[in-house]
Amino acid sequence: MSQFDTEGDLNLSQNRRQWAAENIDAPTRRLLEEDARCFLHQSLSTPCLNVIKSASGSGFEDTAGRRYLDFHGNNVHTVGFGHPKVIAAIKEQLDQLTFCTRRYTCEPAIRFAEKLIEIAPPGLDRVLLAPGGTTAISTALKLARVATGRFKFVSMWDSFHGASLDAISVGGEAIFRRDIGPLLPGCEHVPPADNRHCPFKCGASCSLACADYVEYVLEKEGDVAAIIGETIRSIPFIPPPEYWKRIRAACDKHGALLILDEIPMGLGRTGRMFACQHYEVTPDILVLGKGLGGGIFPLAAVLCRGAMNSSPHTAMGHYTHEKNPVACAAGLATLQVIEEEGLVEHARVLGEYTMDRLRTMAQRHPLIGDIRGLGLILGVELLKDGFTLTPAADEAERVMYAALRGGLNFKVTKGNILTLTPALTLTQAEMDQALAILERAIDSVETRGK
């Protein structure tokens, strides 16, 4: 498996070992060794990189006392880390009701669901809650099967929808699928909307052949329950404006549902409350998660059309913590913070400012091959040269560790794309600080390579 097949940076490289030798002190090293003795080792996480002591606002502090701006955050830091309004809501709820036994409901769950329906794209007026994004994807898949009476799904290669067996079956990353099979039957995969690696050779003059191929598969299969895709891939890959409209039309034509996974991209990150609003498309099922619990509670939601509320005989989710009152209080407070602090518009404005800054930076640095983004999901693709489009993978990793030395945390996806996803509460001054760190890191790697 190549590092270009992964959505994150691998954790066993020489660059990482060198960084650790220079930056991890003895007390931190002991904690990391204790962690490694306790937890099952797996790619992308354990053994761990460092130890976090505290987190607040747009960043965190490690046990050595170094502060980092966090442009990774697993996309849970939508309203920043430890937002005081979210914490206050949690504390208040803890004094009233800490758990809601299944078969019962509670007012925090009702108010949270009402708020989700209020802000959702019109027509999505039913909700199921789940304790995490992967479980919400599982619910969405079951819901689509029951609603259509079909069992097949079409999804995209390179996609990520979670790490459970059904989620990796519709997902398309080798690092999650390898040695795990057999997987869920009926899962077909098609090429994603990625003009940089388009198998149809569309290039700059995109003909949306990838969307047409989805319809071709729908027509040939004939009994697909749903298309499931990430509205915007968090690498990021940003589909052309007509992409989802064409797939929405194909679903309608062939009787398939459209499931859009906005677990990392929903709730304002793209400069709209939901990424699908950029494409003027409403899915049949919309899945949310990551930052929904305020970066504190694991919380996810499945929103669907009211017409799909037709199978009371089947348990779609029925999770123990489905209507956890403390999680729902955190979720409601998070949605209120997003609205009250104008974070959606802030993400749009700051994202445009940052794209301009990154484009200017690219003119100074030959290592930068492409800049792309929407709102505060941003990608800087590093290439060895702009003619062969050869990925600069080792250079990207060295840039990442150089940035860590300067106090900026982000992840590398697909081996050579610096993926920048800051908290939506980030200030322009903090963005300027982060971009200065990033440029120094790129400059140091370019200078070393001369």
Image (tube, grey):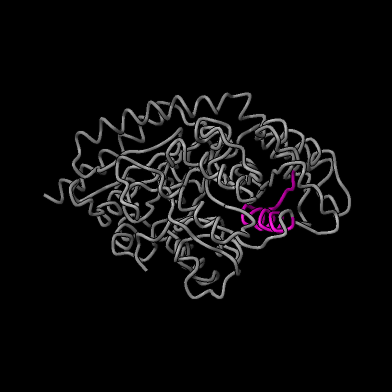
Q: Quadrant of the N terminus?
A: bottom left
- Give the residue drawn at x 65%, y 35%: 334
Locate residue 277: give its quadrant: top right
Q: Position of residue 76 (x, y in %)?
A: 56, 44
Q: Is residue 446 left or right of residue 138?
A: left
Q: Is residue 261 left or right of residue 439?
A: right
Q: Is residue 149 left or right of residue 68?
A: right
Residue extending furthest toward the left? 450
Dominant secondary-structure state across the stretch colored magenta: helix
Q: Which residues are magenta?
A: 127-146
Of residues 79 and 29, the one drawn nearer to the viewer in this rendering: 79
- Give the residue drawn at x 46%, y 32%: 375
Compared to residue 425, the image places residue 266 above or below, namely below
Of residues 332 and 274, the one drawn nearer to the viewer in this rendering: 274
Q: Position of residue 123 (x, y in %)?
A: 71, 35
- Give the residue drawn at x 42%, y 62%: 29
Q: Position of residue 383 (x, y in %)?
A: 24, 49
Residue extending furthest toward the right? 104
Q: Position of residue 449 (x, y in %)?
A: 14, 51
- Give the residue drawn at x 60%, y 43%: 295
Compared to residue 28, the image places residue 358 above or below, namely above
* Membership of 140 in magenta stretch: yes
Callout count: 0
* Membership of 188 in magenta stretch: no
Of residues 124 and 440, the one drawn nearer to the viewer in this rendering: 124
